[in-house]
């Protein structure tokens, strides 16, 4: 199949466009559908407010749509604007751009549905607060869009920066790996930032007087939930901008692809888990506004510990990026080891992240009600989280074994 | 670019890939399950602080049992790397 | 942007060993230390019942951390309070230093967070051995089942990795993002906002998380 480079580049651009809009459509539709369903339920409960609720639903859906619109823009650019007369490595850049934006839009779209839904529900239950609810929904949804913006930034870089100086091997794996790192990494944080936005909006509807402390807690919790996607974006930048001309082509490509997958996949769990914890913290403060001190402290501790597995994924990525193989080795074992290490830590980071986040969520919910026992609860939570982390540590051990011993 | 792929090389590569996938996917379930157990234990201790010792012990035993499939994954991964 | 991987260093020989020091990290750390010492001197120069502004700030911080340490640690271990509050102040100031032009965060270099992580690890375990006695401390590694010992040990070591790399990743990641995005938007509009978010907001939260986790690790070992 001997075709000129431009054929492959053009084909990859079209494929990238497909990934971008295809994946990107998933999240936004889910989020908007959820918002619409809860809006209908709320109108059923309180038909008098139907005008207000409908308006709020449409605004919330518009914000959730933005992730889908970013994905559409990138898709259009890939299909019609990017040049086909580019070096062959651009084929992989376009594929990576499609993955980065498409995957990155899933989480943000889904996450933005929660605050929209809760705002509609709150307007039905407590109509005078509708102004505050809409404001909180907008703030929360805006933070929730940040991971998809990370995906868009990396997609734009991949589309429009000239990577001619990067060697084709292993540069192609670096570009794909970058797309995976930021794309997968944004899923968890997108959903995870939407959950506290939703519960804080519900809390404000229930307890409008405490809007200050609820919103502060939501902002802190959402911002910390962004950290896993930040790790994904940092790995993506490293993969794109470091110079790969001095490493052997084979098997380094597997290391670079594995580095992208390691942080990207591992960021899914902690992002969602942090969201659970922040969500329950906001709900707890809404119930008992005086508890904001201990609740915020324990929330931060729980979120910090829940991020451990994305940090292990980041560690494995750093090892594979900064300690690449020194000699050319074309055997299958060499590349299988590197790719396997990346997949192992990547998948292995998902479960403990979600589980530790749930542990933090229940702990924080209980502390809001029983502030005096907060030290005891925090300690048990940490013990439980540490045990929960064991399988994440097993994955780290197997990854390190694959990298250093095999 | 391609080297001479003998049968044994392919098989070894497949075993190594399998080890990574085994441990990776196998870590998902126990992580979520044990976290849920920890969360519920925290909630129960909040409701009943006097029983903290008993509740903590129950949580740890429950988590240890939930760990079993994770340990199966670890054992299979190590077998695939070192023994096969 | 090619200088993402360049590190300014001082290299010198001592007794046959080649020592490499990261000069930028060292100098920035000294600047942070200088600011903290200056603040401490100014705040305590004339301690009075009606405090001046610096003394008020110092009292607020001491009060807040006193409460946290008091809750977490028992009588015999409360003397770790100065360590905890110094750790927080140093890390907080270090994380924010990047906002000032021509200065960069010492925590951007892996050595700084790793050093404090290892420090916290040794202190926690030393406190644990001193409080519980070596036998009780060692037997904890064999809970809940005998063969879990190696996994428990690795779990303890991985705490050092996670606490250090979390701070390193957040701060270095923030500085890389600011660098790349500023390059892309030709330094218009975005860089001050990003600097405020990563330097001030993320820096404060990560310093607090690091400090609280260290405190909690000491507390878990001593109870």
Image (cartoon, rainbow, N blue to C red):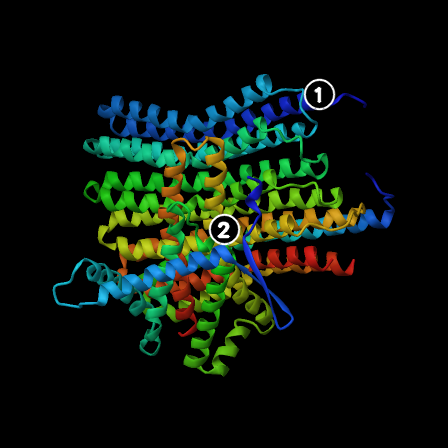
Residue B63 visible? The answer is no
Quadrant of the snapshot with the N terminus of chain A: top right
Q: Which residue is mark 1?
A: A6
Residue located at (40% from left, 34% from top): C190
Mark identifier at residue A172: none
| Quadrant position of the C terminus of chain A in the picture | bottom right
Q: For this rendering, which residue is in front, A5 or B11?
A: A5
Name the secondary structure under disc 2.
helix
Q: Residue at x 66, y 49 (%)?
A: B21
Count residues near mark 1 (Cα–Cα under 10 Å), then give few for <14, some for 14-19, many for 20+: some
Q: Residue extending furthest top?
A: A80
Secondary structure of the residue carrying numbered label 1: helix
The quadrant in which residue B43 appears is bottom left
Q: Is residue B10 above or below residue C219?
A: above
Pinpoint residue C172: horizontal percent, then vertical percent.
49, 49
User: Which one is in front, A160 or A191?
Assistant: A160
Residue C169, label in figure: 2
Which chain letter goes with mark 1? Answer: A
Q: Is residue A28 visible?
A: yes
Left or right of C34 in this view: C50 = left
Residue at x-position 36% and y-position 62% = A377
């Amino acid at each position: 199949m001997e075709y000129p480079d431009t054929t492959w580049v053009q084909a990859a651009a079209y494929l990238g466009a497909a990934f971008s809009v295809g994946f990107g459509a998933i999240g936004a539709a889910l989020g908007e559908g959820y918002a619409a369903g809860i809006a209908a339920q709320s109108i059923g409960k309180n038909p008098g407010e139907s005008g207000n609720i409908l308006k709020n639903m449409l605004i919330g859906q518009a914000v959730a749509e933005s992730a889908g619109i970013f994905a559409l823009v990138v898709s259009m650019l890939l299909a019609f604007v990017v040049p086909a007369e580019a070096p062959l490595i651009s084929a992989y850049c376009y594929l990576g751009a499609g993955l980065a934006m498409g995957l990155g839009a899933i989480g943000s779209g889904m996450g933005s549905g929660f605050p929209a839904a809760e705002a509609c529900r709150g307007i039905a239950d407590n109509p005078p607060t509708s102004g505050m609810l809409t404001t909180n929904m907008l703030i929360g949804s805006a933070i929730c869009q940040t991971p998809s913006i990370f995906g868009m930034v990396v997609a734009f870089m991949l589309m429009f920066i000239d990577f001619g100086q990067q060697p084709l091997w292993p540069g192609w794996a670096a570009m794909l790996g970058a797309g995976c790192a930021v794309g997968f990494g944004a899923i968890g944080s997108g959903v995870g930032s939407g959950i506290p936005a939703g519960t804080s909006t519900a809390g404000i509807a229930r307890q409008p007087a405490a809007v200050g402390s609820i919103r502060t807690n939501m902002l802190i919790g959402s911002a910390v939930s962004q950290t896993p996607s930040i790790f994904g974006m940092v790995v993506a930048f490293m993969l794109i901008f470091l110079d790969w001309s001095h490493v052997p082509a084979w098997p380094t490509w597997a290391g670079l692809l594995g580095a992208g997958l390691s942080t990207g996949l591992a960021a899914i769990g902690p992002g969602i888990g942090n969201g659970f914890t922040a969500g329950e913290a906001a709900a707890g403060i809404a119930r008992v506004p005086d508890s904001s001190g201990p609740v915020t402290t324990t929330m931060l501790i729980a979120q910090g510990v829940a991020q451990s597995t994305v940090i292990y994924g980041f560690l494995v990525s750093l090892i594979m990026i900064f300690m690449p193989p020194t000699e050319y080795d074309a055997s299958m074992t060499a590349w299988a080891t590197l790719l396997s290490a990346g997949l192992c830590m990547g998948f292995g980071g998902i479960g403990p992240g979600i589980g530790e986040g749930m542990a933090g969520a229940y702990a924080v919910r209980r502390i809001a009600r029983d502030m005096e026992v907060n030290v005891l609860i925090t300690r048990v939570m940490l013990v439980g989280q540490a045990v929960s982390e064991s399988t994440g540590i097993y994955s780290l051990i197997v990854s390190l074994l694959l990298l250093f011993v095999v | 670019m391609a080297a001479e792929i003998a049968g044994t090389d392919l098989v070894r590569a497949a075993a190594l890939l399998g080890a990574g996938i085994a441990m990776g996917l196998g870590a998902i379930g126990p992580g979520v399950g044990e976290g849920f157990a920890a969360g519920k234990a925290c909630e129960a201790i909040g409701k009943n602080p006097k029983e903290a010792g008993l509740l903590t012990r129950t949580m740890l035993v429950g988590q240890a049992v939930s760990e079993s499939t994770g340990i199966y994954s670890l054992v299979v991964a190590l077998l695939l790397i070192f023994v096969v | 942007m090619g200088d993402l991987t360049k590190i300014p260093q001082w290299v010198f020989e001592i007794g046959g060993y080649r020592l490499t020091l990261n000069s930028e990290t060292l100098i920035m750390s000294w600047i942070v230390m200088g600011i903290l010492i200056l603040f401490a001197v100014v705040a305590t120069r004339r301690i009075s019942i009606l405090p001046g502004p610096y003394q008020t700030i110092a009292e607020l911080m001491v009060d807040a951390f006193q409460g946290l340490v008091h809750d977490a640690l028992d009588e015999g271990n409360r003397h770790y309070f100065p360590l905890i509050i110094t750790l927080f102040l140093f890390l907080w100031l270090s994380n924010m230093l990047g906002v000032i032009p021509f200065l960069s965060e010492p925590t951007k270099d892996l050595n700084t967070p790793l050093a404090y992580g290892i420090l916290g690890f040794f202190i926690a375990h030393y406190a644990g051995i001193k409080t519980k006695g070596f036998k009780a401390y060692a037997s904890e590694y064999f809970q809940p089942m005998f063969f879990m010992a190696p996994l428990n040990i690795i779990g303890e070591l991985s705490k050092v990795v996670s606490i250090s790399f979390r701070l390193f990743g957040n701060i270095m990641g923030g500085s890389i993002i600011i660098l790349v995005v500023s390059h892309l938007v030709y330094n218009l509009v975005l860089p001050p906002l990003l600097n405020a978010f990563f330097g001030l907001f993320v820096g404060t939260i990560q310093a607090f998380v690091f400090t609280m986790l260290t405190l909690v690790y000491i507390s878990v070992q001593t109870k």
